[in-house]
Amino acid sequence: MEETEIFDAVVVGGGPAGATAAADLARAGAAVLLLDRAGRIKPCGGAIPPALIREFEIPDPLLVARVTSARMVSPKGTEVDMPIDGGFVGMVDREAFDEWLRQRAAAAGAVRLSGTYDRLTREHDGTVRVHYRMGGTDQEQSARARVVIGADGAASAVARQEIRGADRMRYVYAYHEIVRSPVAGQGKFDPARCDVIYRGELSPDFYGWVFPHGATTSVGTGTANRGFSIRRAATALREATGLDGAETIRREGAPIPMKPLPRWDNGRDVVLAGDAAGVVAPASGEGIYYAMTGGRLAAEATLQYLATGDARALAGARKRFMKAHGRVFWVLGIMQRFWYASDRRRERFVSICRDPDVQALTWQAYMHKKLVRAKPMAHVRIFFKDLAHLVGIVSP
């Protein structure tokens, strides 16, 4: 590219957050460079709710499966089915899904480059220079921009350089193995059901999962305990679910943030989105919807800054995100800290999942990405049932 070329924005990272931000900016007429490190696939269950499909116009062919129920498995092996009444959860293959999002950004006008981000420096004219290395070489190149959107994952180099407190991000370390799906009905495998397994030997503070992706299935686990072997746990999970003989296609691991950072911008020319900003839901580990929402809000904040020259506009991305979703993150954070603390508590948690009110409100909140306010008596009933479990009146 020409040395004199100045982009309105350089987006570092081509996952759901970065690709969404780049596409939205390009559609609005901004000059955008999307810098992505090739070859990386994030370990992810791949679940996307109907709200995401609708808001971000995801075509049906990208859905490799439609899940219509979840099975919660307690530490003692109790199984509780949670059917989705009149709905579904879409499942995507992140390798194909993320590339489609990047292609959509390019089709909208974003310039795509494959390279590894190195650092930022500032020019005398007020622009920011993004230094990067092209794939497979040590040769450093650079691009100039008015704004940088850091969407380069949980261990974001952009965030660590530019955002105070980013180095104190809290993580769950996730690992999964993508295996060839068995035929329907083989063992306990159901291609239309997600299995969530709460058992200390699989994860001391999170959960294990079996998420079907059509021809393939994600089998994985996560923990914030650095001394716990999630690879051995994944092996044990495959044995326990009858998937130990399935063909292994690939293995992936990465840190997953569990709490939004208190600040997403540097007050000058950088704003974060996606995992870099910490927007993965506690307890569930869901991140694709929140990443894409954060990418859209980062693009909106960037456009406002470009139009006004007021760097305070960049802080609007976090403000709008937390206004819409902050309460959900707070509730899920409390739930994870309490219910996932021990197998005894997780046994009670799975027991609570039998309740029809819990199931109905859980699925409505998940599919529509809002806390359900329309059924106050259901919330009251759930409160007293939870209280009974907490004080031990009800046995698991």
Image (tube, rainbow, N blue to C red):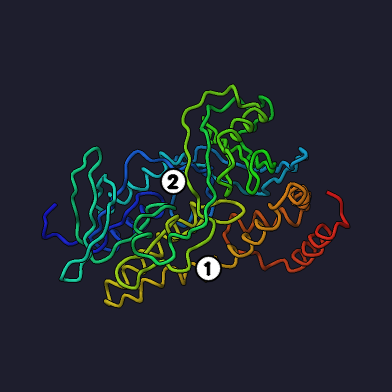
The residue that mark 2 highlights is 59
Judged left or right of residue 42, residue 173 is right
Amino acid type, mark 1 = Ala
> What percent of the width, then of the height, locates residue 109?
25, 54
Closer mark to the observer between disc 2 and disc 1: 1
Residue 33 or residue 344, whichever sits in front: 344
On the image, the x and y values in percent for residue 389 come to 82, 57
- Mark sitting on residue 252: none
Which residue does the image show at 40% across and 72% down from the upper left? 315
Would residue 339 be found to the left or right of residue 27 on screen?
right
The answer to whether one can see residue 53 in this image is no
Name the residue carrying label 1: 324
Residue at image x 64%, y 43%?
203
Callout 2, which amino acid?
A: Pro
Which residue occupies the foreground of this view, 50 or 391?
391
- Mark 1 is surrounded, within 10 Å at the Cα level, by few (under 14), some (14 to 19) or many (20 or more) other residues, namely few
Q: Earlier in the sequence, mark 2 or mark 1?
A: 2
Q: Secondary structure at mark 1?
A: helix
Q: Say if 163 sits above or below 234 in the image.
A: below
Dot 2: element: loop
Task: Tell me how far mark 2 sits from mark 1, CA to CA.
Answer: 25 Å
